[in-house]
């Protein structure tokens, strides 16, 4: 690299002393220095800033789509399969708007009802999990009974041994004599 090329690359990075001084406050000795006095103050500022963005979006997109309530509004993904993440408030406007286009505003009660209904659809009938969620059809009852039969067998097997089973450091069953 020639001397002139070196000078040009240096000029591009920091064109003036004023710019160098401005950036010097944010990075000293390889560590970042925040413009706030402390990390807790910085975090609190960011929380307020993201809360304001969220509240503004909820206000612009109106009351609950189902019941029209204005209380305890939440962001709900219309199709949960298209969801990237729920933490969109710190993103750029274009990226945030793309994600929020897949969302609607629901109150807390309607959001919970929609989520509960979606969970009931995904739990297959005839399993112990669906029995625990309240289903009492013959298939779920037999799955629940089978689970408890297997569990009783394991408990009686361990009771008849003279050695007490214990878990080792990694959570595996081991035997201590």
Image (tube, rainbow, N blue to C red):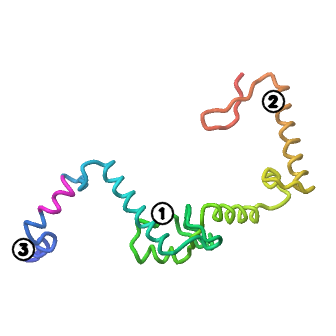
Tell me whether circle 3 and circle 1 mark residues in contact (CB < 8 Å). no
Mark 2 sits on what residue? 158
Near-viewer residue (147 or 69)? 69
Residue at the limit of the structure toward the right, as seen here: 138
- State how far apart marks 3 and 1 are (Cα): 47 Å
Q: Is residue 18 left or right of residue 110?
A: left
Near mark 1 (Cα within 10 A), the count class, few <14, some 14-19 or many ≥20, is: few
Q: Quadrant of the N terminus?
A: bottom left
Q: Nearer the viewer, mark 1 or mark 2?
A: 1
Q: Is residue 14 left or right of residue 145?
A: left
Mark 1 sits on what residue? 87
Tell me which corner region of the image, top left, top right, bottom left or bottom right, holds residue 17: bottom left
Helix, strand or loop at mark 2: helix
Near-viewer residue (16 or 60)? 60
Q: Is residue 104 left or right of residue 29?
A: right
Q: Height in image: 93 above or below 120?
A: below
Q: Is residue 93 left or right of residue 171?
A: left
N-term-proximal mark, 3 vs 2:
3
- State how far apart marks 3 and 2 are (Cα): 80 Å
The residue stretch that appears in magenta = 21-28
- State how far apart marks 1 and 2 are (Cα): 47 Å
Q: Is residue 26 magenta?
A: yes
The dot on residue 3 is 3
Near-viewer residue (71 or 31)? 71
Helix, strand or loop at mark 3: helix
x and y percentages locating residue 101 in the rendered image: 52, 78
Q: Residue at x 38, y 58 (%)?
A: 48
Q: Height in image: 41 above or below 177?
A: below
């Amino acid at each position: 690299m020639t001397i002139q090329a070196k000078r040009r690359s240096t000029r591009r990075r920091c064109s003036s002393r004023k710019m160098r001084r401005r950036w010097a406050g944010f990075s000293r000795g390889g560590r970042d220095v925040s413009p706030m006095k402390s990390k807790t103050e910085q975090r609190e500022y960011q929380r307020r800033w993201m809360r304001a963005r969220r509240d503004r979006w909820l206000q612009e997109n109106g009351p609950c789509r189902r019941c029209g309530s204005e209380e305890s509004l939440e962001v709900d993904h219309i199709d949960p399969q298209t969801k990237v993440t729920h933490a969109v408030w710190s993103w750029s406007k274009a990226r945030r708007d793309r994600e929020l286009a897949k969302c609607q505003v629901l109150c807390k009660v309607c959001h919970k009802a929609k989520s509960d209904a979606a969970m009931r659809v995904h739990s297959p009938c005839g399993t112990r999990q669906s029995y625990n969620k309240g289903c009492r059809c013959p298939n779920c009852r037999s799955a629940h009974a089978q689970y408890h039969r297997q569990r009783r067998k394991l408990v009686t097997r361990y009771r008849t041994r003279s050695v007490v089973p214990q878990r080792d450091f990694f959570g595996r069953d081991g035997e201590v004599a």
